[in-house]
Amino acid sequence: MNQPAEGATAAAATAANAVAHQSRPRQQLAAELRRLRDVAGISGRELAKQVGISQSTLSRIEAGHVVPPLPQVLDWANAVGAEADCQKALRALTEAAHSPEVHDWATSLADRPHLQDDVRAFEEDAHLVRNFQPALVPGLLQTADYARRVFATFDPPYPPDALTAALAARLERQRVLYDPAKRFEFLITEAALRFRPGPHRVLLAQLDRIISIETLDTVTIGVIPQDIDASTTIPHGFVIYDNDDHALASAEPIPGSMVTRGPEGVDAHRRRWVALTRMALFDNEARAFLTELRDEIHRLATN
């Protein structure tokens, strides 16, 4: 058994103070776990073996990219010989780190023109992306004209230069759809498909793009008709990013962006996703629905 890590009591006080101030608990947890391993003199390889995880997962935990479940944190604490008060503080930090992170728009945009790079990082890290949108077409599927008009409606509004930069970054993100190592699944409500941020021609071009993208091997598109028997309520939009050893879910409520990393929270999103898929049309039925909707919009545009 390893000896208790030197300074563990002081570390417990530091961790507890961090929780009290709600100051970046995910990063605080990562830093404290890494510090405890360093003080105990255990290699990452050896600790990963004792905790029952891969070394790459341990590295992601220590970098703050993965939030470990509480049993894993306690196994980690036992492996490094952390004392009871330190374990109590680690428990508090872990619970705080599992709470959703909410970032208001004004603060998030204070020192940069847009947030597209944050979203791209999530997409590039994941091997499976599940995107549900009830109100508008997902960003990865948007045409340039549709995206520009959506960005123009944001509150707080983008300055002209920032809007141009956000649009270019969103279109750049779409290259990830062609990565054969990834999978993208979209669920889109009929209401979202009918959302028209401009003339009918904008929506027609957007529907044509969705129909085209649906043919990619990396993409699955499900459509939820308005008159379908409901198997669950329609929540706000959300995206689930799955990787081999971790996952997260994101949403964009009115105040700002929200990211959930805790396993229980991510699993709640997965359960809602499964319920929503029971209401959706896929493959030939989805293609027929999209074609009929496009034809309907075309008739409206030409009348």
Image (cartoon, rainbow, N blue to C red):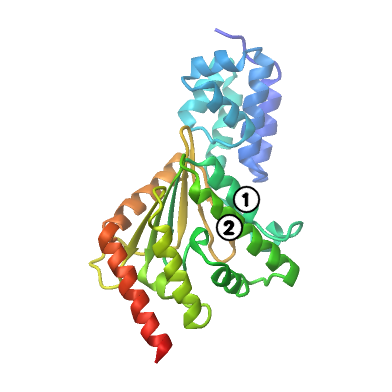
> Quick check: 179 left or right of 111?
left
In which image quadrant can residue 224 be found? bottom left
Three-letter amino acid code of the residue under disc 2: Ser
Residue with the mark numbered 1: 118
Percent position of residue 274, x then y:
31, 51
Please identify the residue farthest to the left as the structure is shown: 229
- Mark 2: secondary structure: strand
Query: Is residue 48 depicted above or below 298 in this figure?
Result: above
Per the rendering, the mark at residue 292 is none
> Quick check: 183 left or right of 41?
left
Residue with the mark numbered 2: 257
- Mark 1: secondary structure: helix
Three-letter amino acid code of the residue under disc 1: Asp
For the question of whether residue 287 can be seen, the reply is yes
Residue at the spot x=53%, y=67% of the render?
143
**Sooner in the amino-acid sequence: mark 1 or mark 2:** 1
Residue at the spot x=68%, y=31% of the render?
13
